[in-house]
Image (cartoon, grey):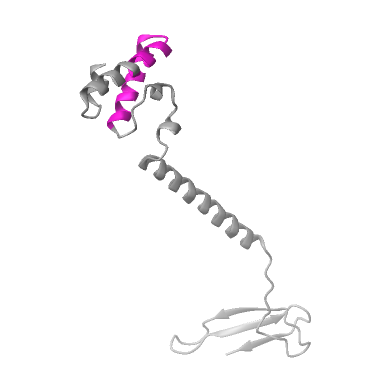
């Protein structure tokens, strides 16, 4: 009870009564000494951290005690960031899986097909441009662009 009272606001008379009621609530719902000690410490820490002191504090879970606190705000922000990250990741995966058509800028001179593959190599000295070796996938025509 002294631990609880030491964490209470300055009004001594009311704080002693509140500390006594909180201790009685802890005592009534405990099944052994360790559980009682844990509940009293939980109440003292919550009162010290600024939670509104009330006898039912010992029976409330951590989510109820953090309502309106900075800790709750941090948890909500973290949850929001996780959801946002999951949504962005899902969109990224969907965009990778989506087949995007592209049209080749090269066209076969013989059959006018755009099914052209090419390979670029440096065949001359380094101060000159590269050569592109092209092959038409439709007719097999080959040509070089220098």
Q: Position of residue 48 (x, y in %)?
A: 27, 30
The N terminus - image quarter:
top left
Which residue is rendered at x = 23% and y = 17% of the image?
A: 2
- Per the picture, the main secondary structure of the magenta-coloured stretch is helix
**Picture quarter containing residue 53?**
top left
Q: Position of residue 20 (x, y in %)?
A: 30, 16
Point 59% across, 58% down: residue:
91
Q: Nearer the viewer, residue 122 or 92?
A: 92
Q: Quadrant of the C terminus?
A: bottom right
Q: Is residue 143 left or right of residue 43?
A: right
Residue 33 point in image, percent of width and height: 35, 10
Which of 19 and 127 lies nearest the eye of the viewer?
19
Indicate whether residue 94 is drawn in magenta: no
Residue 128, x across and y down, in percent: 47, 90
Q: Is residue 42 magenta?
A: yes
Report the magenta residues as a range.
Answer: 22-48
Towards the viewer: 48 or 114: 48
Tell which residue pokes out farthest to the top in this image.
32
Tell me the residue at 47%/51% (across/down): 81
Pick whichever, 124 or 105, lies toward us: 105
Residue 31 placement, left or right of 104: left
Q: In the rendered picture of this protein, how many numbered marks are placed on residues?
A: 0
Q: Is 8 left, or right, of 21 in this rendering?
A: left
- Residue drawn where x is 20% and y is 29% of the image: 10
């Amino acid at each position: 009870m002294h631990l609880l009272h030491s964490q209470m606001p300055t009004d001594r008379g009311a704080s002693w009564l509140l500390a006594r009621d909180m201790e009685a609530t802890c005592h009534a719902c405990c099944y052994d000494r360790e559980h009682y000690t844990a509940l009293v410490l939980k109440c003292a820490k919550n009162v010290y951290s600024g939670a509104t002191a009330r006898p039912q504090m010992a029976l409330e879970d951590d989510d109820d005690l953090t309502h309106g606190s900075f800790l709750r705000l941090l948890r909500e922000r973290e949850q929001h960031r996780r959801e946002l990250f999951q949504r962005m990741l899902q969109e990224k995966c969907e965009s990778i899986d989506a087949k995007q058509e592209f049209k080749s800028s090269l066209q076969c001179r013989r059959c006018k097909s755009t099914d052209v593959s090419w390979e670029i190599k440096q065949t001359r000295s380094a101060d000159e441009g590269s050569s592109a070796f092209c092959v038409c996938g439709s007719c097999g025509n080959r040509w070089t662009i220098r």
